[in-house]
Image: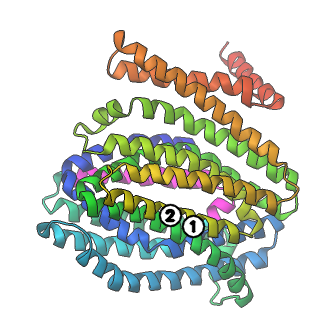
Amino acid sequence: MLYVRMFLAMIVGLYTGRVVLATLGVEDYGIYGVVGGVVAMMGFLNSAMGLATSRFITINLGKGSSDELTDTFSTAFFLHLAIAVIILLVGETIGLWFLNAKLVIHPDRMDAARFVYQFSLLSTFFSITQVPYNSTIIAHEKMDVYAGVEIMNVSLKLLIVYILQIGDFDKLKLYSVLVFFVSILIMMVYRGYCISHFKESHLKMRINKAKAYEMAKYSGWSFLNNMSTTAENQGINFLLNIFFGTIANAAASIATTVNGMIVGFSSNICIAFAPQITKKYAVSDYAGCIAMLSTSIKYTLLFFQMLMVPCWIECELLLQLWLGQVPQFTVDFVRLIILVSFINTFSRIINDGINATGQIMFRSILTCVFSLSTLIISYFALKNGLPAHVVYYSMSSTHFFILISNVAILRVKIRQINILGVIKSMLIVMLVFVFNFAFCFFAEHLFPNYLSGFLRLVTICAISLLLTAALSYSAVLTDAERIKVRSFINKIRYKHG
């Protein structure tokens, strides 16, 4: 169900991205990206509490404690409501000042930028209070519901594109209003489902102080982690705006969209595995926890590199087919941000294990140091006249060190872990990636003599898919997994034979 949702989201995202860019224009598209970034920058406190909420709800489910589960949900909701009010106040003061005084936006479009900002801030307010409900759905592993609502979400985005084209208003303002109302509708659907199906989502007008303290302690370190990550991402966006203007922001927004599709393709596995990793740790099944981590690493990264390789090699052609008009900087940005995400995907899976332990202090401190160093390096690099894409080179380097530190922390926090087994899973996937990339790169330079344009792109994608499947079966899967694959294939052959 998650992959059905992902394929629809990818197709709709490609179409709507092209139409929105063409309808808004490069300048307004960049404004929407950078103004939305101001609001996103203030959301790191919510991200920290969201991680804590997800962990504690999943832990309580794993232990089968219904009373604690109800207390956890109600406490989490009111904490998120408080966070939403704080962010709204900060947004209407410091955030608004930053928009007016610091961002490089053409004076004629400043009124539209403020309009977009207000709706983005409102959307963020409601999204924050929604976190406990979404966490509950994922903790209960109702992936079909999660996927179904997201399919409805992408369908409504198609409606947005249609209205945007026929609307008579300022296109940027209209787009921000429509996106806001879609987010509210999706929020109502999720809440309705939770209230109907999960007893713990019936709010109790009380806060469990002990539970609140426990969650606040955990989220405090998560807050540091998310604050530094958000500062890094949005700081890069602001640096690009200051040194290169909204054209660079448009390119960064497109790169983020492409990257989001590739990450979304692989992250479905992380979403499905994360609750199981936490639940197994909660009942001290360390062997099962580590087995889940290793399996998640294998499959997540295999799916990621299967799409990453053709997107990297045929990046320019893909963007031309998708957008028609490709803004300056976009090709370099797309390639490099995908590389950063490939490294981050390793870290994300390792973090699932660290998060399950609840001991995230050292992870958060090191992530903060490395993430903020990205901004410092990028600032001085741009100040000395280096090209815009240097920011992503800086990010990929620092995030590699984050990955190494996370592996070391996981070994310390779960002493029963066979760290060599986890590293072996990572190295095997890396070898598959290197072989796949080298073969497709050679093929891409060979095919121009025989194939061109769209046909070459399809051929490279097919090679990447088949090569990944063949290498995975022979070098990555365990004997038990190979037996399951053969059994599945035989059932299909018997059914259609």
- In this image, 227 relative to 57: left or right? left
Q: Name the residue under label 1.
A: 369
Going 53% across and 41% down the picture, which residue do you hit? 4
State the SS at label 1.
helix
User: Which colour scheme appears in the figure?
Assistant: rainbow
Residue 332, magenta (yes or no):
no
Residue at (32, 61) in percent of width and height: 383
Which image quarter holds the N terminus? top right
In the rendered structure, the answer to whether residue 20 lies left or right of residue 332 reads left
Amino acid type, mark 2:
Ser
* Residue situated in front as seen by the camera: 382 or 194: 382
Q: Is mark 2 on a helix, strand or loop?
A: helix
What label does residue 277 carry, if any? none
Magenta segment range? Answer: 136-164
Residue ID for mark 2: 373
Determine whether 20 is above or below 448 in the image. below
Q: In this view, does 235 lie above or below 327?
A: below
